[in-house]
Amino acid sequence: MKVNIFYTTLSSSNIYKELANKLLEEKQIICVNIIKNIESFYKEDGLLKITNESIMIIKTFLSKSKLEKLLMKHHPYDTPFIAKILIDDVNTAYKDWAEKNL
């Protein structure tokens, strides 16, 4: 199986903890890393917005389409950013550990 890594953002710690737990309990993902307290700058409806968010990095064996469908079901944003981070390879020991523990 191939390990895939995805990136998304969320607005509050309660939401990312709940989402991470849900995905882990459903055995859909291997691991989640959270990078807290980032500032996001963007324009919406012509207005500059600045929000505090957290980055969620998701490690999984799921394809992008399957993970995207799963996140769209549970993600609180109407239009979340969901991107696959392209990687060449993952060390064999980690991959074996992940397959055993999923």
Image (spheres, helix red, strand yellow):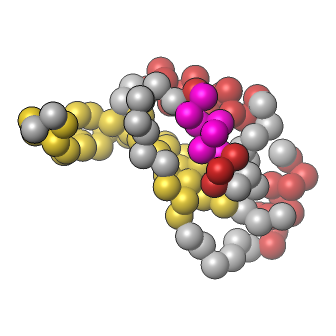
Question: Is 88 placed above or below 17 here?
Answer: below
Magenta: main secondary structure: helix
Region of the chain picked out in magenta, as a range: 67-73
Comparing 36 with 24, the one in front is: 24
Q: Residue furthest bottom?
A: 88
Comparing 69 with 94, the one in front is: 69
Question: Is 17 placed above or below 29 here?
Answer: above
Residue 72 within the magenta-colored segment of the rendering: yes
Q: Say if residue 63 shows up in the picture.
A: yes
Image position of 73 (left or right of 26): left
Q: Say if residue 31 shows up in the picture.
A: no
Residue at (60, 28) in percent of width and height: 73
Residue 10 within the magenta-colored segment of the rendering: no
Residue 9 in percent (x, y) is at 41, 41
The answer to which image quadrant residue 44 occupies is: top left
Image position of 92 (left or right of 23): right
The answer to which image quadrant residue 61 occupies is: bottom right
